[in-house]
Amino acid sequence: MFRLRYLSYLRDYISPMIEITRSRHAVQTFNRSVVLSKTLTMVTMSSELDIQRTFEFVKDLTLKAGEVFKCGFEGEKVVTVKDEWDLVTDYDKKIEDFLINTLREKFPEHLFIGEEGTAGSSDQIELTDEPTWIIDPIDGTINYVNGLPITCISIGLTVCKEPVIGIIYNPITSELYSAIKGQGAFLNGKPLKSSKTTELKKALIEIEMFSIRFPSKDRDLRAGRLDAVTHAARGVRFMGSAALALAFIARGALDCIYMEMLKPWDIAAGVLLIREAGGTVVDAKEKEFNIMRPNIIGGVTCELVMEIKKLIIDTDLKIMRKRLKRT
């Protein structure tokens, strides 16, 4: 039985990823093909949506939401345990309600995906081609609750399932990261450019350890991947805010991120920031990156991203072989 599982694993998981790693340009080629296949649809929908005016509107709205964010950070707040390892505050709901209600009034035809599920009848579980706002009112809630200023508001807009606007705002440090598809990435209005690190041994990377805390038959795989990446990198950070980590890659403060079991609101804005700053984003497990089921490797160069992906593949193979020997 285990041998069959192992062979199935090789067929469905390892083999497709090995195919990708044959060329360091594979990810770039795939991204170009996706863009080309959707160009006509996106042009049509974008012509109906004034991207620049939409961006200016949501940027101003985010700054206003930041005032509410700061009130909660500095003052009293009601904290609820959402699940065993996650918290939610009354300010999560206040900020999400404010953002979604205001956006819905301005863009009544748009759809919404919000972390706290307060968006109403237009909430979406599956992403469609329609303009869709993906919102995390407080990313890094545990940091927020504890007064650690590594926390932010993250807002992304997708059209045809592709991010076209991304804003990540840390009201505590007054840092607003922004990107419009095809127009570059910015920090407080100044252009961003990611670093040019190509080797993992020279890279400072962000990882999250929470995935190995969940009960799973594949916990040894997750732990093995994290161990391999940690030992191969120059340095490792664990910030507690995926959105800000992505923004830090766009600004060149971090070189790469490797995280599993994220949600779309964690990465919708940050993925666009990295791409617009010249970086690369892929799925750690599959050929195609899916914003709704992200297991993300995002980095400043394609070479660095593909080195990490290959390391994960090799590590998984070693662990699966050990499993096979034990049977």
Image (cartoon, helix red, strand yellow):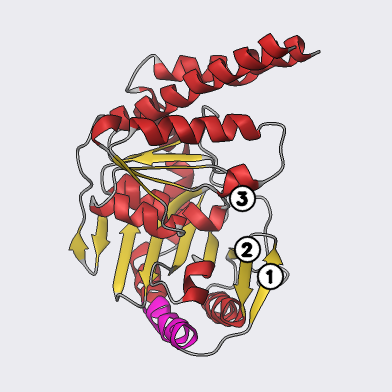
Q: Which residues are magenta?
A: 60-74
Q: Is disc 1 placed on a helix, strand or loop?
A: strand
* Cα–Cα span, label 1 and label 2: 6 Å
Q: Secondary structure at mark 2?
A: strand
- Residue 218 in percent (x, y) is at 66, 31
Q: Nearer the viewer, residue 101 or 77?
A: 77
Left or right of 210? Residue 198 is left
Q: Position of residue 312 (x, y in %)?
A: 48, 26
Q: Indicate which disc residue 128 carries.
A: 3
Q: Which residue is mark 2?
A: 86
23 horizontally vs 81: left or right: left
Q: Quadrant of the N terminus?
A: top right
Q: Residues within 10 Å of mark 1 (few under 14, many from 20)?
A: few
Residue receiving disc 1: 81
The residue that appears at 32% across and 21% down in the rendered structure is 24
- Label pair 3/2, CB-CB below 8 angstroms: no
Quarter of the figure with residue 9: top right
